[in-house]
Image (tube, grey):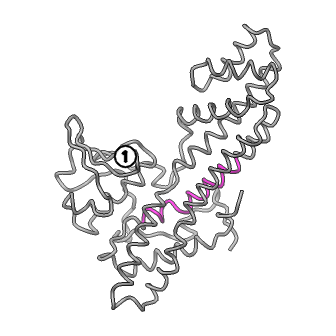
Amino acid sequence: MPLPDAQILNPGAFDPVSFPGVAPDEAWPPEAFDFAAPWLSDDSLAFERGISGEIIFVRRFEALRLVLDIENAHSALDIPPCSRDFRLLRLVPSALRLVESVSPGDPVPPTLRGEPLPPPEDHQLYVATTALVAALERGAGEAGGAFLNALRRTPPGVNMFEVAAARCISEGGFGLERMAGLAKGLQRLAHAHAEVLAAHAAQPDYQGMERMVTATTRVLVRDAGWSGDLLAHALRRIDPLASTPRETAENLRFAAVAMLDGEATLEAATRLATAQAEVRDRLLDLGIFWRRLAAAWASVHPQFTDRREVDALCRNMLRRLQLKGLYRGV
């Protein structure tokens, strides 16, 4: 199946994704994490992601920090399975890929509701610039070496390239045209790589989707009433393929980093920026076609979700896996 143009095609129109338990006329994800449970309505509470990716439930200004297995967190927090609060809770890991913390009443990140990704954050631009400075040192020449040294001594920010170029001109006596060209080329490359890092960081919660596919497969296969059903056969087929989008996203990021490690020179900055932009576009397409489906799978309860809704999610997943252009090599 050819890859639809993600820039002009709404993936919802390509293959509508329904969240389990959501009424046909209900918009989901909602605008805010407006939990109904009274013990989840205190804005001093927060969900955060731990160092190893675990979900941590925090009561701010106190010492309470509860590490949660998000698939079973509804039990620890006394939330009924498949309720609205249950679905909100299952959105938390996806939201924490886009924001640092989630508190009751916080808005759901716009990207999770289908809006475009925001520009790269300062720390992503700084990481990209640091990687460039290290990669471009070889063969930089006198002017290039001076510019890279000036970048090291310039505080990070959107104007750091212009500031470094001005320092080289005023303190080092280098020509305006040469330094302006270096600044423009490296700024474009740094922004392109930062956009790759941002697009990768904002990928859907693929691991949560994979865990839920595996858990649902395990429950149906063990259930004598379902083990021979077509849905159980579909899940057996899908389970080993569910890692495809995550592995693709990781490979794309590795490829973007490898470009800088193996090919980066000052003269190649424009060509590399174009190549980085292509990787960014691939990551954006991947996120567009999987973000809603990954979040919907995370809302499944292996035992209580209606099997017709699981069947619909299986069909959505198979259709997306047929878009071979999403997963080709760089």
Is the residue 215 above or below the residue 89 in the image? below
299 vs 168, left or right, is left
Residue 138 magenta-drawn? no
Residue positioned 59% across, 56% down in the render? 249
Tell me the element at label 1. Answer: loop
Is the residue 167 above or below the residue 129 in the image? above
Q: Residue 327, located in which quarter of the rendered image?
A: bottom right
Instruction: Determine which residue is flagged by label 1.
Output: 50
Dominant SS in magenta: helix
Residue positioned 20% across, 42% down in the render? 64
- Residue 38: where, in percent of width, then height? 16, 52
Is the residue 234 above or below the residue 21 in the image? below
Is the residue 235 above or below the residue 96 in the image? below
Question: How many tags in the picture?
Answer: 1
- Residue 245: where, in percent of width, then height? 57, 63
- Residue 238: where, in percent of width, then height? 51, 76
Give the amino acid type for the residue marked by disc 1 in the picture.
Gly
State which quarter of the image contains the N terminus.
Answer: bottom right
* Region rendered in magenta: 277-296
Residue closer to the observer: 174 or 287: 174
- Residue 19: where, in percent of width, then height? 40, 68
Residue closer to the observer: 292 or 329: 329
Q: Residue 27, located in which quarter of the rendered image?
A: bottom left
113 vs 258, left or right, is left
128 vs 81, left or right, is right
Residue positioned 39% across, 61% down in the render? 28
| Furthest residue toward front | 138
Residue 290 magenta-drawn? yes
